[in-house]
Amino acid sequence: MITLLNYYNSMIDIIITSYNEPKATLRAVKIFLRQLDDIEARIVVCDPFLEVKEFIKENIKDKRVGFFLDPGDGKSYALNLLLEKLPGNKDDIIIFTDGDVHVSENTVAEIIKAFEDPEVGCITGKPVPIDNREERYGYWSHLLFSGIDKVRKKLSKEQRFFECSGYLFAIRKSIINDFPLDASEDSIIPYLFWKNGYKIKYLPEVEIYVKNPDNWEDWQNQKIRNIKGHENLTKLFPEMPRTKSFWNEVKYGFLHALFYPRSLKESYWTLQLFNARLAIYKKAFQDLKKQEVYYDGWREVETESTRTLD
């Protein structure tokens, strides 16, 4: 790793989007700082709360860490503003992640290594649930993340298009300078790279540790928001290959889910998950039918149970 990091001379920008989670965001920043020896890099915390800026400033005395005040018009809007402010070339890298998750210690080194292939334009890592599998919602997160991991490994190996994870993905700088606001950034940005002839690569060895919702209200709010963002892609780019959709979930996930349980209790929870997924897809489609334009309401309704430290 030392040889690799010393060899890399271009700029890495790490954008950490957060929402009033100062302690969790501080942890996320510190984990990245430990990986930046001998690398020219900047970390930008993007948050709509000035209290987070003061907390980060008080606890980290490092000139590589800055703050961008999110104007509060959605995550996609804030990221577009930041893309305008980060000049560079295609050898430079931007890493996007969230303040309420944290990454494995090999993240920066593995991303740099993957971008040594000039045909790779976009990279994503492997979300890993930190939830208790012995509880229903924790089991659901383990099952769903396992299915996502399986699909991404397959599509990446076959060099086919797939949508990335908003928890962590990285891109070459200067290839795209903006993206549409009315879709999930972890889907539309990889597609714009794909349209420009770049490959999407999955790095299962790069892990992102995620706390998922542990109650029905938070769980459905999070999942419905996610479905709306991805389903709106059909309106914007009807030619775009979809990996996150109801039919693909059935196609790739049904048998995987049936064989995933280790006990009768987990089998019962799997059946409950089938019903829950049907319910949220129904609600999301009903909302989209009423709503002519998708609104990027990231954190519009907070999911308190996903907050790990704050």
Image (spheres, grey):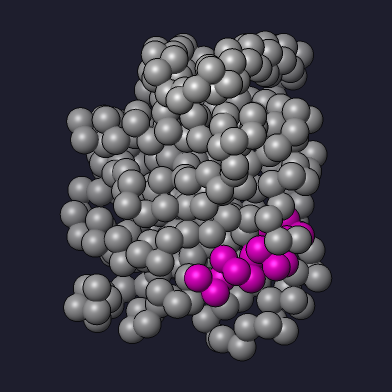
Q: Is residue 119 visible?
A: yes
- Please, what is the dominant secondary structure of the magenta stretch? helix
Residue sitting at x 66%, y 63%? 24
Q: How many marks?
A: 0
Residue 88, image x and y in percent? 39, 67
Residue plotted at (74% across, 44% down):
305
Q: Judge whether 185 appears above or below 221 on screen.
A: below
Q: Is residue 22 magenta?
A: yes
Above or below, 252 relative to 143: above
Which of 259 and 71 lies nearest the eye of the viewer?
259
* Viewer-proximal residue among 153 and 289: 153
Q: Quadrant of residue 114?
A: bottom left
Query: Residue sitting at 76 percent across and 52 percent down?
Result: 72
- Picture quadrant of residue 52: bottom right
Give how far across and how far down residue 33 sits, in percent.
Answer: 48, 76
Q: Viewer-proximal residue, 104 or 157?
A: 104
> Residue 10 in the image: x percent, y percent?
31, 73
**Magenta span contains residue 93:** no
- Quarter holding the C terminus is bottom right
Left or right: 132 with respect to 10? right
Residue 189 vertical placement versus 6 (above, below): above
Instruction: Give the percent coordinates (x, y) of residue 183.
Output: 57, 33
Q: Is residue 284 left or right of residue 207?
A: right
Q: The N terminus appears in which quarter of the rendering? A: bottom left
Question: Is 254 situated left or right of 294 in this image?
Answer: left
Residue 238 visible in the snapshot:
no
Q: Which residues are magenta?
A: 17-31
Residue at (45, 19) in percent of width and height: 257
The quarter of the displayed image where residue 299 is located: top right
Q: In this picture, is 23 found above or below 179?
A: below
